[in-house]
Amino acid sequence: MTHLGLLDIIQLLGYMCMGIQMVLNSNFGLIPDKILGAFLYATWLGVIEMMLLLAVNRFIALTNVHISKKNSGRLFIALFIIAYGFMLVNLVILLLPEYGFLLNMTTYDLERLALETHLIDMQTNILFGILAISWALYLITIVHMIIKLVKDYEIRIFFQSLFICGYKSFVNGFTTYWVPPSVLAYYISFFVYLIESGYNPYMYFFTN
């Protein structure tokens, strides 16, 4: 979280410079705009990398992955080195001649080689790839937590009673206020209503 916060602060300083440009209604010049644009975009990608590291941290902590504290520390040191190394490489590329993202008052202006090599597309794909991995880890962690919860008998009964209440509410509203517009819809409606009285044995089987 500390690393994420530091990168957020650097980004905030960049956006403050963008705000100053808007107040002055003028850019700072080629070199300052190039440096500011490079730092803003590199830290943007760095923030996403830190989000992935947070996802890995929560995944390890909550899914009981068998890894010792010592090895966990080594793993995160390696991940931090990779993340900052990748961010540094990205920063250097953005500072190369004709490869920059020039900070403008409200957006970025891409230099010639950045446009020709589709640099923004490549980096966007990397960014969404990192986010996809983060979401996958979070979803696995959530499923694991739910499985741990439903192992408890009282929790299983809670979900059973919650489902019964929800299904009863749905069926009563469904059969009272919905008029089937076709024969097929009528059969579906009747089927939903018919199985209402018989789902308790199935619920008991699945939750007990």
Image (spheres, grey):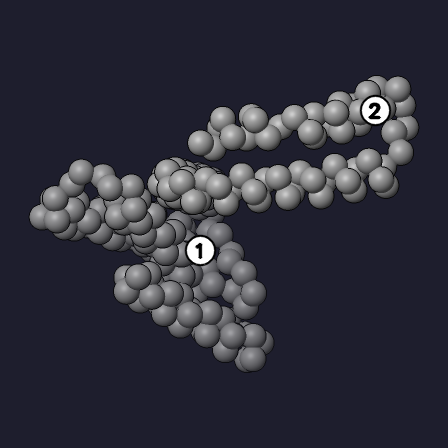
The amino acid type, in three-letter code, at marker 2 is Ala
Whether tag 1 and tag 2 are in contact, CB under 8 A, the answer is: no
Residue 92: x and y in percent read 29, 52
Q: Is residue 177 left or right of residue 85?
A: right
Q: Name the residue beneath numbered marker 1.
A: 101
Residue 156: x and y in percent read 45, 40
In the image as oriented, which residue stretches furthest toward the left?
A: 70
The local secondary structure at tag 1 comes to strand
Check disc 2: other Cα within 10 Å, few if <14, some if 14-19, many if 20+: few
Q: Is residue 179 above or below residue 52?
A: above
The amino acid type, in three-letter code, at marker 1 is Phe
The local secondary structure at tag 2 comes to helix
Q: Is residue 54 left or right of residue 208?
A: left
In which quarter of the view is residue 25 placed?
A: bottom right
Q: Name the residue beneath numbered marker 2.
A: 185
Check disc 1: other Cα within 10 Å, few if <14, some if 14-19, many if 20+: many
